[in-house]
Image (spheres, coloured by chain):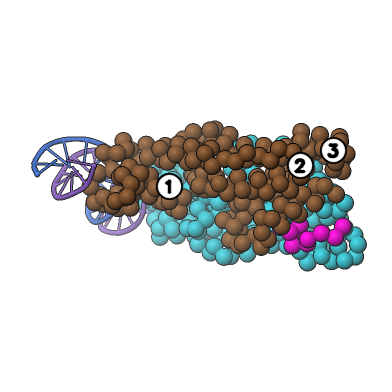
Chain colours: A cyan, B brown, C blue, D purple
Amino acid sequence: MARDTRDRILDTALAAFVARGIDGVTVTDLEQGAGLSPGSGSFYRHFRSKDDVLSAVVDREITRALERREQEPAGGALVEHYTWALDNLDRMRSLIALLVRDGTRLPHLDRIQSVLAEGGSRIDASDLSARMARGEIPARDADAVASVVLLAVVGHHLAERFFGGPVGVSRERFAAALASLVET
Amino acid sequence: MARDTRDRILDTALAAFVARGIDGVTVTDLEQGAGLSPGSGSFYRHFRSKDDVLSAVVDREITRALERREQEPAGGALVEHYTWALDNLDRMRSLIALLVRDGTRLPHLDRIQSVLAEGGSRIDASDLSARMARGEIPARDADAVASVVLLAVVGHHLAERFFGGPVGVSRERFAAALASLVET
DNA sequence: GTCTATAACCAGATAGAC
DNA sequence: GTCTATCTGGTTATAGAC
């Protein structure tokens, strides 16, 4: 075995929770996935309960999401901000998948939401207002435009999962179209 | 009792499945919610199994969504199309909630997706291409713009649930901003 | 730290009286 | 059609040997 048992259980748990939801995964599944004898209860030498492993999985994913974080492009073109936001959501996809699957039951729910919210930091009304004031982009209802942009980006990320099909355009074309709409 | 037992079970089941997911709801819960003795098994005089009631709930919601359907505005302003699409998603919110909660396990999944897809019928690339060709709206990457619009609308619907906060702008302002972005 | 074995519990589902 | 009672199977969790 490459990693130690606790890590193998965590890896198995993350994949299983994302794929089948918390209730769809048994402790026996986790033992089997980690190479332990199914039904043996060896799981309990590493975690106190199923809730305990869920909590550990969420903690680890929050940490990983923060580690993978990349600096937001400083000023400049909107398309770079939007591409960055899409990449950011992609880096946090496990966390998003957990949130979508079992939203209300997750531990540290507000922490998760605040980590995810960082992914849209520059997609806010104040940045758009400033650009409108400087005449860089046409003046429109900044709050509403910010909302459209943020939700388009989020929708892009969620679409394949819930609407059962590929989005059909690459993230580059998507970000470019979004920037073009806002800028002209 | 106002309606008969079968209907009360269906009503209870829909609300419970949406709120807690399929696995979060027991047959005993459904009996209690329908005014039957919990744990009695009286449920089984009306449905063969829990899967059976799920299937009946989905069937009924598909029928209801189709009944509530309203005619799409014929030609004209984009803002009316977008408002119509938002209203449409709202009329299908139970179905969407079921899909989000327990996507992969639902019966008639392709039927659900095709019903939902109708809600975005006029938000497609061919309509936008035609408008661009007629010079009604600026020429842009029609596929990418259609994708942005559709996913913004879907994102608007899903946002409150997954990002834990109200969108902040009314559907009217949202639709107006979207139309303004596409039209100018 | 992992195993065998098992306790305790709860969920889905059935039988038969009323 | 609803009830009481019960069966069956699966799930969480623990005990104790190795």
Chain letter of disc 3 in the image = B
* Relative to A147, B140 lies left or right: right
Count every numbered label the image shows and give the total. Answer: 3
Q: Mark 1 sits on what residue? A: B14
Q: Mark 2 sits on what residue? A: B76
Disc number lying in front (2 or 1): 2
Q: Mark 3 sits on what residue? A: B132
Chain letter of disc 2 in the image = B
Q: Is residue B15 above or below residue A130?
A: above
| Magenta stretch bounds | A138-147
Pinpoint residue A43: horizontal percent, then vertical percent: 41, 52
Residue at coordinates 87% horizontally, 58% vertically from top-left? Answer: A137
Disc number lying in front (3 or 1): 3
User: Is residue B72 highlighted in magenta?
Assistant: no
Residue A68 or residue B121, whichever sits in front? B121
Residue at coordinates 46% horizontally, 50% vertically from top-left? Answer: B18
Residue B66 or residue A149, whichever sits in front? B66
Label 2 element class: loop
**Circle 2/circle 1 CB separation < 8 Å:** no
* Amino acid type shown at disc 2: Gly
Residue B178 or residue B160, whichever sits in front? B178
* Amino acid type shown at disc 3: Met
Q: Do tags 3 and 1 sit on the same chain?
A: yes
